[in-house]
């Protein structure tokens, strides 16, 4: 399976008491100064391999706009990979990799704001004045639901969340951490569709982090953001591409409980109940397309997989 979705597990940790008890924990301010976020986006393609696009956001010096101080935010495209007919990936030599200034970041009262320099408008990027059960409204259609409190990631408070902009919505689809933000990347609250945060670094590590479209190892990585995927890493689906029968298989530690078949826009096409570590489903009724599978395990994890139906 070439398409890698970065999703968090659904952990049923419902805490009794008021939200005040959660907010009493030590809060880690957002790492704005001297930080770097590396993101990737998958471009689904019918064939043996997907395309991939990589970029980074990073902060520069402070600037004063009106009566507010912002840290300048830049962006640089890193590489764009497209497959040939054999599945081998090739980089686009025409990609613009120059630095682009996109805006500024600031934090106030546990809320992180971004100002877009092209429109001179400020937007709420993160709200960390939260507790399990809260819903953050960024716009009427862009919301984040706080589902569960997870064990800390590198000492940072970490939540399982549902983002309305994720292709698998309303499934629990990502995580939110104090300090560096969404598992979908810096702008993950607004842009969750097939996008992942690959790594985050700050201070000296941000200077040395030069991502070359290979796995990150600095500071925060995919493997540490998502610590609950026991039994999921060995999940297999085959054959892929397929014309009819598709087999889904986990290790024997956890069974598959339900499979939802969706189109690439997240529309539910079929829901299949089961209870086994190996399940066969028949996709012959669907036209040639890319299908998404939301696979719910008996431990309440939800795993997303891509299938090419020909």
Image: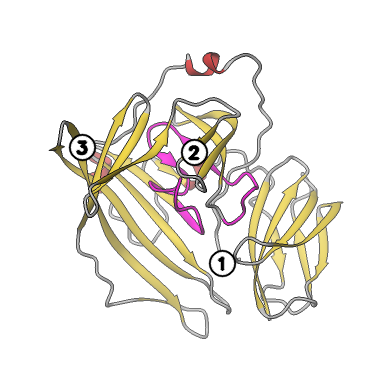
Q: Residue 184: horizontal and vertical position, in percent?
A: 46, 49
- Disc 2 target residue: 137
19 horizontally vs 310: left or right = left
Labels 1 and 2: the sequence-earlier one: 1
- Residue 2's disc is 1
Q: Quadrant of the C terminus?
A: bottom right
* Depth check, front residue: 135 or 174: 135
Q: Which residues are magenta?
A: 167-196
Q: Residue 33: horizontal and vertical position, in percent?
A: 23, 36
- Dot 2 crowding, Cα within 10 Å, few <14, some 14–19, many 20+: some
- Dot 1 crowding, Cα within 10 Å, few <14, some 14–19, many 20+: some
Residue at image x 36%, y 44%?
200
Callout 3: SS: strand
Disc 1 to disc 3, C-alpha distance:
39 Å
179 above or below 236? above
Callout 1: SS: loop
């Amino acid at each position: 399976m070439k398409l890698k979705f970065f999703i968090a597990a659904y952990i049923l940790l419902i805490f009794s008491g008021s939200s005040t008890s959660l907010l009493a924990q030590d809060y880690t301010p957002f790492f704005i100064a001297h930080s770097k976020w590396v993101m990737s986006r998958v471009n689904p393609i019918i064939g043996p391999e997907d395309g991939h696009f990589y970029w980074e956001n990073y902060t520069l010096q402070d600037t004063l706009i009106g009566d507010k101080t912002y840290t300048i935010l830049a962006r640089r495209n890193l590489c764009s990979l497209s497959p040939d007919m054999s599945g081998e990936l090739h980089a686009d030599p025409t990609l613009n990799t120059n630095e682009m200034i996109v805006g500024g970041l600031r934090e106030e009262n546990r809320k992180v704001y971004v100002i877009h320099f092209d429109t001179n408008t400020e937007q709420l990027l993160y709200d960390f004045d939260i507790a399990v059960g809260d819903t953050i409204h960024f716009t009427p259609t862009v919301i984040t639901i706080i589902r569960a409190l997870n064990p800390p990631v590198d000492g940072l408070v970490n939540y399982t969340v549902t983002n309305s902009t994720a292709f698998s919505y309303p499934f629990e689809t990502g995580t939110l951490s104090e300090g560096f933000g969404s598992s979908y990347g810096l702008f993950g609250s607004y842009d969750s569709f097939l996008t992942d945060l690959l790594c985050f670094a700050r201070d000296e590590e941000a200077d040395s982090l030069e991502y070359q479209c290979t796995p990150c190892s600095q500071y925060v990585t995919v493997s540490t953001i998502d610590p609950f995927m026991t039994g999921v890493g060995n999940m297999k689906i085959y054959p892929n591409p397929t014309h009819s029968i598709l087999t889904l298989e986990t290790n024997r530690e956890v069974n598959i409980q339900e499979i939802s078949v969706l189109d690439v826009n997240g529309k539910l096409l079929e829901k299949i109940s089961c209870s086994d570590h190996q399940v066969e489903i028949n996709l012959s009724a669907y036209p040639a397309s890319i299908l998404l599978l939301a696979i719910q395990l008996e431990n309440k994890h939800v795993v997303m997989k891509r299938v090419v139906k020909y």
